[in-house]
Amino acid sequence: MGITKTEEFTVKQNELAILAKAIGHPARIAIIEYLLKTDSCICGDIVNELPLAQPTVSQHLKELKNAGLIIGNIEGTSICYCLNIDGFKKLKDFFEHINSYLTSKECC
């Protein structure tokens, strides 16, 4: 495997790439949609909502958490998850920048 050379890119570019990679799986999109729908921190219900085994769901939650898109707080013997507003704000700002470009330019 080759070297990714992430050090050749800005911190912002690397952060956005990590965020984009984290939402690049349908199970993670489903988790985000579920957290949006419930509008509260969720502890154990996520596994019941997805057609995946508990270890697989845990891995997807870990990826979302490592990317900064969700927050996991320990409550008793379980971890409760909710959306991380700061992570989604970075994505929102990026897509708003693209949108402003697309609405002000004509196709090449």
Image: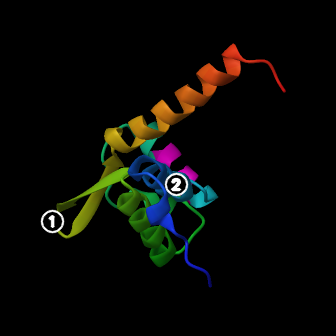
Q: Nearer the viewer, mark 2 or mark 1?
A: 2
Q: Which residue is mark 1?
A: 76
- Quarter occupied by the C terminus: top right
Identify the residue shown where x is 48% and y is 39%: 91
Q: Which mark is residue 61?
A: none
Q: Give the x, y percent position of residue 9.
A: 48, 56
Q: Give the x, y percent position of residue 82.
A: 33, 48
Quarter of the image for residue 58 reads: bottom left
Amino acid at circle 1: Gly
- Identify the colour scheme used: rainbow
Residue most toward the right? 108
Q: Which residue is mark 2?
A: 17
Is 33 part of what is drawn in magenta?
yes
Amino acid at circle 2: Ala
Q: Give the x, y percent position of residue 23.
A: 55, 53
Relative side of 38 to 77, left or right: right
Q: Give the x, y percent position of residue 67.
A: 40, 58
